[in-house]
Amino acid sequence: MIPAGHFHMGGDFSDRVKPVHTVTFAKPFKIAKHVVTFEEYDLFVKDRILTFPDDEGWGRGKRPVINVSWEDAADYARWLSKLSGKSYRLPTEAEWEYAARAGSDSAYYWGEESGWLWNKTSRPVDKFAWYDKNSEGKTHPVGQKLPNAFGLYDMAGNVWEWVQDCWHDNYTNAPIDGSLWRVENDGDCGRRVLRGGSWGNYAKYLRSAYRSWDLPDYRIYDFGFRLAQD
């Protein structure tokens, strides 16, 4: 359960994350502690008689499901909602960043320092995230790194996470209530937002405000997702 509150969304390191703006959540919402795993997603595949996503030879089980598109993630959420009688969905982009920051206003939810130091043991990021310097070129089982202050794991690194929103090139006229940002105001629903960075990225891509996009039907070995609820 993520409490109601407000935060400053965005940053000053790229036009993509400007202008910084205050987003207020009038009500709490729920977001999963972990990204969806192969163990969970494979149940959906079996039930729907679909093709299993490739694990790249790294293993399935508790590892994040990868090689899934935004469309796959949305379909999984609909399937789980019908199966459980509860309403599951992808988080909005604002919900995701608010949950990732967990009350922090720093570049990373563990502080300002990414840890660009030669001595590996002195990098703060290693305690919280799988990224290019420590991942050995693959995903890792969920929950092995330290959680953020909200108790959420892997909100930085391991896999990029699909969120609901259509892509906008910046935050001009972005919603300030945490709601879904659709195609209005020059948005593009032919592109969907990704957050969090992955096992293959430099630490700078793990910043809480960093955002990227891809096509809604695109699948690759470092894209995954987690679910949310009202």
Image (cartoon, rainbow, N blue to C red):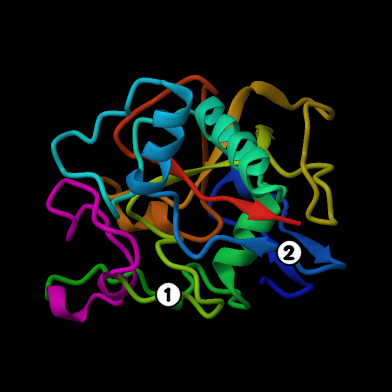
**Quadrant in the rendering for residue 141:** bottom left
- Which residue does the image show at 24% across and 49% down from the upper left? 139
Q: Quadrant of residue 165?
A: top right
Q: Are marks 1 and 2 in contact (CB under 8 Å)?
A: no
For disc 1, the marked residue is: 147
Quadrant including the N terminus = bottom right
Was residue 27 drawn as part of the magenta stretch in this picture? no
Label 1 vs label 2: CA separation? 18 Å
* Label 2 element class: loop
Q: Amino acid at mark 2?
A: Phe
Q: Amino acid at mark 1?
A: Pro
What residue lies at 38% left-to-right and 56% top-to-bottom?
Answer: 204
The number of callouts visible is 2
- Image position of 196 with respect to 171: above or below: below
Q: Is residue 189 above or below residue 5?
A: above
Residue 4, x across and y down, in percent: 79, 73
Left or right of 119, for residue 201 = right
**SS label for mark 1:** loop
Q: Position of residue 28 (x, y in %)?
A: 77, 69
Neighbour class for label 1 at 10 Å: few (<14), some, many (≥20)? many
For residue 50, which quarter of the picture?
A: top left
| Magenta region | 120-144
Screen quadrant of the C terminus: bottom right
Q: Residue at x 33, y 39 (%)?
A: 222
| Residue corresponding to mark 2 | 29
- In terms of secondary structure, what is the magenta stretch mainly? loop
Q: State whether residue 139 appears in this view.
A: yes
Q: Position of residue 200 (x, y in %)?
A: 25, 45
Can you say whether 13 is above or below 8 in the image? Answer: above
Which of 124 and 77 lies nearest the eye of the viewer? 77
